Each structure stands twice: as C-alpha cells, then as structure tokens.
Image (cartoon, rainbow, N blue to C red):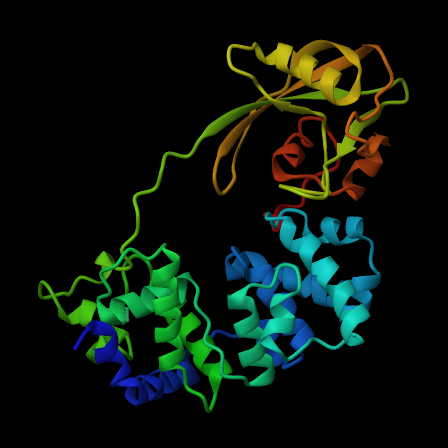
Amino acid sequence: MNGIAHVVARKELIQIGLKTWFERNARDLPWRNSKDPYLIYLSEIILQQTRIDQGTPYFLRFANEFPNIESLAAATLDRVLKEWEGLGYYSRARNLHRSASLIVELYDGVIPADFEQLRSLPGIGDYTAAAILSIAFRKPYAVLDSNVIRILTRLSAFSNEVSSSLTRKTLQVFATDLLDHKAPGRHNESIMDLGALVCRPKNPDCIHCPLNQFCLACKSGHPFGRPMDFPVKKKRARVPHYDIAVGIVLNQNEEFLIQRRAEEGMLGGLWEFPGGKRESGEMLHESCRRELREELGIDVAVGEALPPVNHAYSHFKITMYAFHCSIQSGVPISKKGLPVRWVARDKMSDYAFPKANRALFETLKIGVPLPERG
Ligand code: SF4
C-alpha cells in the first residue's frame, strides 16, 4: 500500500482527530464569527500570500469601509488601493474590485455558490473557490494550499517533488478523499489551523499532533521521524536584484511630481515617483535622467541623493536610489498615456504608493508612514 492509500484508509479516524483537536484549538479569527459569504470571500482574498497577523487589520478595515459587495463595487479603484496600501500583491485589490462589480452586475450582488462561476471571477483560483464554497455554503470542496500540502505530504511520506501540476492534481484528489463531507468547511479550517499551529514548516510539534499515529513521516526514519524531509521541493533559483533610480521633482509650488502605474501588471494602479531600472554599465544619476526623459519627456538636472531603500518582492529584490531633480526643459506628460500629477506635500498620503516609494516619505518629510500597515 502506498503512503496516500495508507492515509486514506484511515480517513474516518483522521477526520475525528481533526474535529476534536479543532474544537479545542481553533484560532479565534474575526471572519469566523460570520457565515456571510462576502466576508469569507474578503478574508480569503486578503489572506492569499499574507500571514494572518498581517491580514487581520486589513480585513477589519475593509469589512468596516465596505460592509457589503455593493459598497465595494461602488468604490473607486483608487480608494480600494489606498485601503490595501502596504499589503502587497496589489493585483488582489484590483481583482477584488473587478469581481465585486461583476458579482453586482451578473449575480445581483449575491456571491455565487457554484465552483465554475466563482472560478470565472478575477482573482479567484481553485483554493479560494473551494474555501468559499466549503465554509460559506458547506459544499464538499477540499482546499489545497501550502499548509495542506505540508500535512498531506508528511502524513503519506510523499516523495515526489510538489511543484509539478501532475503532483498538485494527485494531492488535490488526496485532499478530496480525506474531506469530511458532513462538515467540509470545518474540516478545511481545521487542517489550515493544524498546519499553522502544529505541523509547522520548521519544528513541527509531532508529540501534540492529533494525527501523529497515522503519520508516516513522523514514524519513519530515525527515532524522532523525518517530517522536515517533506514536502520535497526544488532548490530555489537565486533571486535577481535590480537597481532602480527615481527622481524627486518639485515645482515652484512645492508640489511633488508623481505618476500612476498602468493598471495591468505589477503594482498596477499605484502611484510612484517617476524612474526605473538602471541599465548595465549606467551611472545611477544617468539612469534617473534617462528614465525621466523616456517616461515623461522632461530633461532634468540630477542633484542630491536620498538614502537608498532596499525592498524584497516575491521574485526579485531592488535597491531604490532617489535623487532630487529639477526640470530644465519640457512639461511632464506620460509617453504611455498614464496619469501624471503635481501633488502638495500634505496631500501625498491620499495616494496609494508601493512600500519602497513610501519608505522615502520620512526622508522627504511627507506625513508619517502608517506602521500598522507593514
Ligand atoms: S505528526 Fe508531525 S509531521 Fe505528521 S502531521 Fe502531525 S505535526 Fe505534521
């Protein structure tokens, strides 16, 4: 019998173990006090790629600012991005906003209780659809995220590398086979909590795990088991690093020049100081001058540098070098047709900026960055 079959053969005992453990140990999370599909949907989008402690204040703020799907759909994208500021992965905010409009338009403001309809909405993948359907509508869909993968691969001592789509399909079938059809939402939440609290990536607490008697990774190998060998992952490639040069341009009214990023793509719809990547062999001040000419059609004199800012994104890192600049000729107009504005110092905080730009605010004495927003 392979590892998966070994575990599935014990599924009733595993379901009971999870249920009993969850009744005593479930995390007290604000969205769990409600079965409102909208709030569950909101929480699931916010928690994609985000830790619970970081996402919870954003969930509370969104639930307060946009208490239902209609209010979210009616808000401007700028307002939604502003509320999202600091949480990262801004495509989630844009998709949330677009999906809210579609739900109002196509489903009369009612979150659909159908897998395909949910999946067709921007930003809703298999995991999010399964979470909404199981938790809000008690439908038998199993979630599969990194927490669940960790538990399943450890339980079954699953030795295949987990990033391939074929392996994902195998694990999705495995998760579905283990699902407690009487309470799919609770089952999914219990396995998520077990992954966060007990079967942690490092130092899993196997001694207190309700599933330890069924777990092949914990039993096999040396006396303390080998859970850390699972899931089997590819070695990570080196993360690339880029230097970014940006211009801090003020006009005679002491207003800052900022531009809005295109809505499609990374950090879409956010505002930023103009600039871009340093090209190979280029001096940083040259990059700054070239970027402002290419992006906005202005020639600038590049002056004093601000302290550099380091920032890590999911797939690369940057160091941002900002320079005070003054316009020598030209009027700033985006070559790509994007909005460009002059904004007074006390109005800058009304705009949503990426974290690396926002890190310059203190040096530039623009308000104070909001610490609780990460
Ligand atoms: S026994 Fe250990 S490795 Fe196995 S599921 Fe529980 S915490 Fe994870």
Residue found 31% across the figure and 89% down from its top = 12
Rendered image quadrant of residue 24 = bottom left
The N terminus - image quarter: bottom left
Q: Position of residue 82 (x, y in %)?
A: 74, 49
307 lies above or below 4: above
Q: Position of residue 343 (x, y in %)?
A: 85, 31
- 67 or 143, which lies in front? 143
Q: Position of residue 290 (x, y in %)?
A: 68, 14
The reply, left or right, for residue 74 in relation to residue 305 is: right
Res. 195 visible in picture: no
336 lies above or below 236: above
Q: Position of residue 307 (x, y in %)?
A: 59, 21
56 lies above or below 1: above
- 235 or 273, which lies in front? 235
- 189 or 278, which lies in front? 278
171 lies above or below 347: below
Residue found 70% across the figure and 10% down from its top = 302
Residue found 43% across the figure and 85% down from its top = 23
Q: Residue furthest left?
A: 222
Rendered image quadrant of residue 193 = bottom left
The reply, left or right, for residue 343 in relation to residue 127 is: right
Q: Residue furthest bottom?
A: 182
- 153 or 57, which lies in front? 153
